[in-house]
Amino acid sequence: MVVVIHLLYRILSSAKRMQKVKPYTLHCSLLVLVFIYAFVGGLIFNKLEAQATQEQYKKEWEAKTECVHKASYFLQYLNNS
C-alpha cells in the first residue's frame, strides 16, 4: 500500500501541470485503498465467522423456545390447580 502511494506521489510530482491536482489525487487514492482494505477485511471476517454466527442464532432460538415452553407449562399448571 505504501509502495502504491509512493509511486502515485512520484508520478504526480513529476508533472508540472498536475501540481494542483496532486493533493486531491493522493487523498482520493488513499480513500480508495482504505475502502478496498476494509471491504476485503469484511469478506474475510464474514468467511471466518459465518458458521459461528449461525450456531449462536440457533442456540438463542432454542433458548427462547425452551423458555416459552416452560412458561406455557407453568400457565397450564396454574389453570389446572
Image (cartoon, helix red, strand yellow):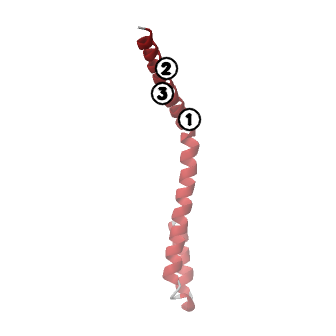
| Residue tagged 3 | 64
Residue 3 vs 75, above or below: the answer is below
- Secondary element at tag 2: helix
**Pointer 1 or 3: first along the chain:** 1
In the picture provided, is 81 more to the left or to the right than 20?
left
Q: Position of residue 12 (x, y in %)?
A: 55, 82
Q: Position of residue 46 (x, y in %)?
A: 56, 45
Please state the total of marks drawn on the protein image: 3
**Residue displayed at 57% across by 40% down:** 50
Specify the quadrant of the image occupied by residue 80: top left
**Pointer 3 or 2: first along the chain:** 3
**Residue displayed at 43% across by 15% down:** 74
Alpha carbon distance from label 2 to label 1:
23 Å
- Secondary element at tag 3: helix
Amino acid, disc 2: His
| Residue tagged 2 | 69
Q: Position of residue 43 (x, y in %)?
A: 58, 50
Q: Residue furthest bottom?
A: 17
Residue 15 vs 77, above or below: the answer is below
